[in-house]
Amino acid sequence: MNQVAIELKKVSKRFGEVVANNEVDLKVYKNEILSLLGENGSGKTTLMNMISGIYFPDSGEIEIDGKPVVIKSPRDAHNYKIGMIHQHFKLVDVFSAADNILLGEKMSEYSISQKAKETLSTLPEDKIIKSVEKDGKTSKTVDFKVLGEIALTYLKVAALPFIKLGKLIKFDILAKNRAKDLQEVADKYGFEIDLKKKIYDLSVSEKQTVEIIKVLYRGAEILILDEPTAVLTPQEIEKLFAVLRRMRDDGKAIIIITHKLNEVMAISDKVAVLRKGEHIATVDTANTNEKELTEMMVGKKVELNIDRTEPVNMVDRLVVKDLSIINHDRVKVLDNVNFVARSGEILGIAGIAGSGQRELLESIAGLVKFNSGDIIYNDPAKNDEPVDLKSKTPVQIRELGVRLSFVPEDRLGMGLVANMDIVDNMMLRSYKKGHGVFLDRKSPSKLADEIVHDLEVVTPNTHTAVRKLSGGNVQKVLVGREIASAPTVLMAAYPVRGLDINSSYTIYNLLNDQKEKGVAVIFVGEDLDVLIDLCDRILVLCAGKVTGIVDARSITKEEIGLLMTKTEVSEKEGE
Amino acid sequence: MAKVKANKTPLVRVSKRTDISGWKALGIRAIAFVAALVVGGIVTAILVEGNPFKFYSYLFTGTFGTPRRIWKLLQDLAMLLLISLAVTPAFKMRFWNIGAEGQALVGVLAAGAMIYYIGDSVPNGVLILIMAAAAIVAGIIWAVIPGIFKAYFNTNETLFTLMMNYVAMCLVNYFINIWVTSGSGVLGVLADGHFPVIGNQPQILTVIIVAVITVLVAIYLSRSKHGYELSVVGESENTARYIGINVKKVIIRTMVLSGALCGMVGLLLVGGIHYTVTADLVGGTGFTAILVSWLAKFNPIYMVATSFLVTFLNQGATFAADAYRLGGSFSDIIVGLFFFAIIACEFFINYKVSFNLKSKKNEAKKAEDAVESEVKEEVQG
Amino acid sequence: MFASILTSAIRFSTIFTLGSTGETLTEKSGNLNLGIPGIMCAGAIGGIIGENVYIQSLSSISQMTAFGAIVTPLIFSMIFSGFLGAFYCLLTVTLKCNQNVTGLAITTFGAGLLSLLGNRIDKTGFAQASLYFTDGMDFASKLGGFGQVVFSHGFMVYFAIIVAIIVAVIIKRTRTGLSLQAVGENPATADAAGLSVTNYKYAATVIGSMIAGFGGVFYIFDYLGGSIEYTIEAYGWLAIAIVIFSVWKPNLGIFSSLIFGFLYILPYYTQVNFAQMELIKMVPYAVTILVLIVTSIMNRKESQPPAALGLTYFREER
């Protein structure tokens, strides 16, 4: 039987009103890979951050090797041999991979008092003055051998601080061939990487390898990987899995956060499922299947009372053809995406975070250049005449008369200016209107009043900086502004993230109103219940590919869940 | 069993304030100002024997004692304010232009050069116009070069503009040495290009010009489309991208404005105040202006107050230094102390410091050990 | 002729070497300390006060010893410049104030301090004390031109070069240097690796300030032979230029300082008029700008300023 490496007992953590983890129990054994499975916002990362010392639990206990421990900082976690590989790598760009691994390494403990004790214990038992019998007389003489030994021992003790200093200096000096020694360790584990290379020259998967070596080098026995496959190609994932298996066989406990079911099945020995901050179950991978896991992950279908009308007068408003984007890391973030957004309907976009949703919306809005493909807008003002949006800037798109509104995911960092008041934020879209050099604050001010009134924004007045508003009110301001320009296409990315239930419904109703007005609405969401109840059709993205465009009225959560995780491996199995 | 304690809080906790009432912020600043004055008084008391309170009365008599001193105060205030206004648009855009000194200096040079080369051949009115054009163009050139490189290559603007100051200084000395053939290296008062004197007070024109520019810059920043764009760029480049602002264009345009205003400073220094050209005509005001603008939160109206405080302290302390025979640099120390106090007080305006002294006695030691690591844990959360 | 120019250049470059080494060390921790000119002034005034205290403590000037005349001003200089460096950190690291603004205020203050106190302090015996600073090796004159160039200088010239080399080695070859660079490049990563960003910033800035402060002492006691002049602030700004010019490498800083020193004294040795002299003085700044532009266009990661230079680090923000 394996030993328990780490055990969480009734660990809870809340952020303000939101309960991120509620009395979660979790056991991880040595020689075991555990998958932590759950939807976005189910509390996986928060839970792991409490093990790695980034957050501190509100209540509950953590035991390591059967002993209760308190982990208050990353350094504590390191002392308990816990290593976490975050989604956003913590590496210094201009350092070589080897230097990143060495960074922060401490010299092994060298206690002078302890060494002194050890040295003193070797003091000879013999007395310095010894009696010598000579010619029948006993005379006392000094035994120089013993004296010498004693003197030497004390000298050794006296030298200890200098030895420590010497060791410190020796440790501090970086050997020229430091990369070589590390390289040997890396090669032994089977990592294919040149540690002499600078981080900025490495690919994403190589950077991840550096993080893994760093954690291993520091002697971690418990490894946590936060969505390690999100940025990797299938081949790289295979390599990573091989490494993880080898480490498992080496006696390490490994926790891997993921929501890709096929990977869960491929790599893990056990699966722990979290849903809305609660631990649902831990099961042996061998005794479960993807369907069962999906059900545990998404839970029972929740009825939402969203008033969905049948779409009328549908026209192809926005046509996306063969859209592909390759990002700076040379990863294909969008791969041959084809779809049509129609007026008078809500098109939902489902997918695991980072599957290309952001790039898709930003390329439509003209913020991201795409490598190949076309985006065509059919202008209702000109009898649905097609307008090519390829390589157009946001300003050019507006000048073409395309009434496109975009509620970005990053509300305060992109959609709004946090330090400006509501009126000035209204102006973001309209300040260029008019020919004068001066701003017209009257109409934005009026608009701000209207939005505050109509959407019940809780704010002292319209001259309050938006950063002081609560999340829901910030979103009302943003969505209100985007709707105010009477768009024909409205794109919203995660518009209800972090919002309470009432604010969420306000947003759903606003989107529905727009749909009924004949706007083509594109809604990127994470809550599958909402997607199914709000949208007319749902497009599912998986790793930049469209894995399906389905009718929201007839699809089930599980089916979407499977499409969301349908990577090449499972595709082949399906064939 | 070491149970994990629930609400463990570190001894000192620093968190960002989101809202502080205007009065409270003003109060903190007032305390800082008074603290600087008290320290200044103590320093004076150490340096001179005699009544340290005399220092404070010198501060006032040195600035408001005679009409002449009041006019001097107004003129210095105007110049400091103008150069502070010049750096403000760039700072609002988070472009750390510390080259106002050099930008003003090339303005001085250009205006002086016009007097030197064509002063005899054109009427004074035309000359002043030409001087204005030359000074402004020179200021623009000096400011826009770092701007262009920042926009296109992200060249570090702080270091670039800093170096440009010294290039300007050498350039001024070069021309002075060309113009002055006697070898003294000092250019006397130039005969032409003097601004008209209004109402017998040569300072009035400067004060009026700066007052007008203050209002114009205030309007530009808060009411114009350009001003709005540069604030958006400064606050969040991502938002600027989102609404389609051309960030490069905004950076270059704003540096043109900054440079033009600095050129104005040079023009006023030559045509309205000193009527000559020296390398230290700007005299470090370009650096002081950065502090003045920053302390005023880049608001032109507040800037009137901050530049008044700095000018008041400077002139008052200079007067006190003369009275005590302490030498001209005494005022630098007093102004420096004032800056330290105000800079430090910004921390207490922007951050909230809370102390937790609740920990029980038997746990006190343990808590102390834990504080450091705990602060880390808390802040990382 | 050339030997004597070179000798002067090496001697004069010492103030730049010390100033730029101190500033490089500081900037490596991510602190763009624009207060360094003021701190060099503070180091100078500290040296002056220290020497004054030492001489006052003697019953007659003839009792002066080399040890006392050298060590006392250096210790006082370290106290003054170290204090200003620590104060800069208090404002920018602990109190998280804007680095540019704080640095400029420190420069105003430090320069003011030098000229305020510089005139008021009794400088009797300074000329004699400065001889201990300027004494070169005895055998220098026997070796002709070569000896003059290499061995005729006071000890601070060699001290500056050794300090620059030590700092270069620490930055490049030790874990301490690696950690320091990590703090300046990416404080969040250093933090996660268990390094104390605050401690590194304080240590680098205070030690850097002390090194730069020695530059002030050198200028007063070696170069000026115990008299006083207020141009140290200008050399401080040049030291900042040298940091850029040497792309944040103290070993290159030695040669950059030499080039700057050479250009600075060249006009005094050549048949140029005052105007041309100014043009030569302009060269160092112009070349620095060129280096800044070229490195930013080439965008080589190694020759960039530390990535977090000038930014205050607050863990709660990310």
Image (spheres, helix red, strand yellow):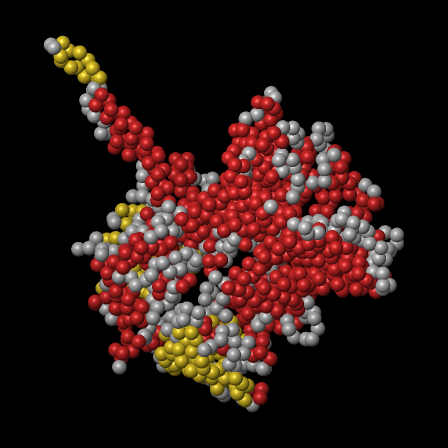
Left or right side of A113 for B232: right
- State which quadrant residue A291 falls in: bottom left
Asked if one can make out residue C281 in the rendered structure from this viewpoint, the answer is yes
Give percent across and percent down for residue C313: 50, 52
Q: Is A157 situated above or below B191?
A: above
Image quadrant in which you'd find residue B268: bottom right
Of the 4 image quadrants, the one containing the N terminus of chain A is bottom left
Residue drawn at x 75%, y 63% is B134
Residue at left offset 25%, top offset 56%: A252
Residue drawn at point x = 55 percent, y = 76 percent: A393
Q: How many marks?
A: 0
Who is closer to the viewer here, B59 or B13?
B59
Q: In which quarter of the image is the C terminus of chain A?
A: bottom left
Q: Residue C265: where, in percent of width, then height?
A: 62, 47
Locate residue B181 relative to residue B4 in the image: left or right.
Answer: right
Q: Is residue A536 above or below residue A147?
A: below
User: Does residue C269 appear to the left or right of C295 in the view shown?
Assistant: right
- Horizontal and vertical percent position of residue A87: 38, 62
> Where is residue A195 shown, x and y percent of the image?
34, 59
Residue A465 shows up from this direction: no
Please name the residue shown 41% across and 35% down the image: B361
Closest to the observer: A458 or C133?
Answer: C133
Q: In which quarter of the image is residue B112?
A: bottom right
Query: Most extreme residue toward the right, as rendered?
Result: B200
